[in-house]
Image: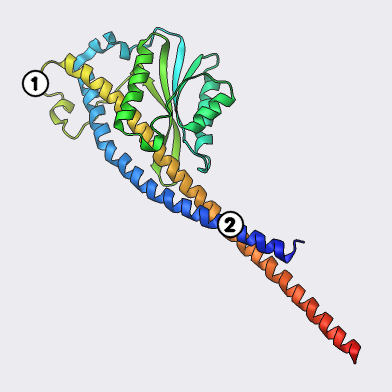
């Protein structure tokens, strides 16, 4: 059994770890609320532009098939956008998205895949396994990504698709559903297969197929909307992944704090028992010595 000094050192170490994990839990909770607010605030815009593109595609009819973004690319390879975290200590967040990727790879054997990676953990995972990383988006860090950075990522994927090297572009990210539920999600990105013509905030007449006055014309408006639609999809994927990361980190740090508290309580019980045994032995030695002197 450990000595009293060793137990005292362990208790001190556990208490220090508990303070660190508690602080990290509070930081993760604060950032989670901030990014959750951003993700929720972006959803109306995302829904509106999705519905608008869907209604415009319906108006365009068969003309959409003439546009390269709506047809498979000329190449044979597949480009994968993988969104992971820059840091660890977030539970099974990264493991789950990697499992989703590996499952997709098993379902599509023989595919030649190039990776476009957001998040340092994803980059390290792929490099360790000898996967070909076409581009690692290290700057800006995921936590500081804004719409401009997301738009640049979307333009990079569009340019790679139009280069004729890839047949498809697929994204893997974590969709945020609640504070305790975040689901690894596969997002077909290019070619654009179908866009739901949702009833948007300002889509009354268009959603009902009413007469529209389009200036300059439907094709010009549609061509301008499609890149914005793709940029919005990437931006939402990054926001939801970041929100999921902090939700997972908050839960992980809370579990670590609770475990440290339980471990500290158990160590204190052992420490008190050991200390009491030592005191009792010392008292018995004193009493025995006093009796021997009589």
Give the crowd class for mark 2: few <14, some 14-19, many >=20 residues within 10 Å.
Answer: many
The residue that appears at 51% across and 50% down in the rendered structure is: 253
Q: In which quarter of the image is the C terminus?
A: bottom right
Hey, which quadrant is residue 186 in on the image? top left
Give the crowd class for mark 1: few <14, some 14-19, many >=20 residues within 10 Å.
Answer: few
Q: In which quarter of the image is the N terminus?
A: bottom right
The answer, for residue 176, to whether it is visible in the render is no
Hey, which quadrant is residue 218 in on the image? top left
On screen, 219 above or below 268? above
Give the labeled residue for mark 1: 213
Task: Pinpoint residue 141: horizontal percent, then vertical percent.
Answer: 41, 34
The residue that appears at 11% across and 19% down in the rendered structure is: 214
Side of 42 relative to 169 (left or right): left
The answer, for residue 68, to whether it is visible in the render is yes
On screen, 160 above or below 206? above
SS at mark 1 in the image: loop
Task: Pinpoint residue 75: horizontal percent, then vertical percent.
Answer: 43, 8
Question: What colouring style does the render use?
Answer: rainbow
**Residue that lies at the very extreme toward the front in this rendered image:** 293
Q: In this figure, what is the number of numbered marks?
A: 2
Contact check, label 1 and label 2, Cβ < 8 Å? no
For the residue pair 218 and 129, the one nearer the viewer reads as 129
The residue that appears at 51% across and 35% down in the rendered structure is: 94
Task: Pinpoint residue 289: horizontal percent, then vertical percent.
Answer: 87, 84
> For the residues carrying marks 1 and 2, which lies nearer the camera in this image?
2
**Residue that lies at the very extreme toward the bottom in this rendered image:** 294
Please give the label number shown on residue 37. Answer: none
Give the labeled residue for mark 2: 260
Hey, which quadrant is residue 280 in on the image? bottom right
Task: Pinpoint residue 150: horizontal percent, then vertical percent.
Answer: 33, 28
SS at mark 2 in the image: helix
């Amino acid at each position: 059994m450990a000595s009293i000094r060793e137990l005292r050192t362990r208790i001190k170490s556990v208490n220090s770890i508990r303070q660190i994990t508690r602080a990290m839990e509070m930081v993760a909770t604060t950032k989670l609320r901030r990014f959750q607010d951003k993700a929720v605030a972006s959803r109306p815009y995302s829904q509106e532009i999705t519905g608008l593109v869907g209604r415009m595609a319906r108006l365009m009819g068969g003309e959409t098939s003439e546009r390269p973004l709506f047809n498979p690319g000329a190449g044979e390879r597949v480009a994968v956008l993988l969104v992971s975290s820059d840091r660890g200590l977030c539970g099974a967040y990264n493991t789950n998205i990697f499992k989703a990727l590996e499952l997709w790879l098993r379902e599509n054997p023989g595919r030649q895949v190039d990776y476009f990676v957001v998040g340092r953990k994803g980059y390290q995972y792929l490099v360790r396994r000898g996967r070909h990383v076409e581009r690692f988006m290290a700057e800006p860090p995921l936590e500081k990504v804004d719409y401009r950075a997301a738009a640049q990522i979307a333009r990079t994927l569009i340019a790679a698709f139009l280069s004729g090297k890839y047949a498809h572009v697929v994204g893997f990210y974590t969709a945020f559903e609640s504070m305790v539920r975040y689901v690894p999600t596969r997002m077909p990105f290019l070619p654009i297969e179908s866009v739901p013509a949702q009833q948007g905030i300002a889509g009354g007449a268009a959603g009902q197929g009413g007469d529209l006055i389009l200036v300059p014309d439907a094709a010009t408006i549609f061509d301008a909307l499609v890149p914005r639609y793709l940029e919005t999809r990437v931006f939402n994927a990054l926001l939801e992944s970041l929100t999921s990361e902090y939700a997972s980190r908050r839960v992980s740090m809370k579990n670590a704090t609770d475990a440290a508290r339980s471990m500290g309580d158990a160590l204190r019980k052992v420490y008190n028992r050991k200390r009491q045994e030592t005191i009792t032995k010392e008292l018995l030695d004193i009493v025995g010595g006093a009796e021997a002197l009589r």
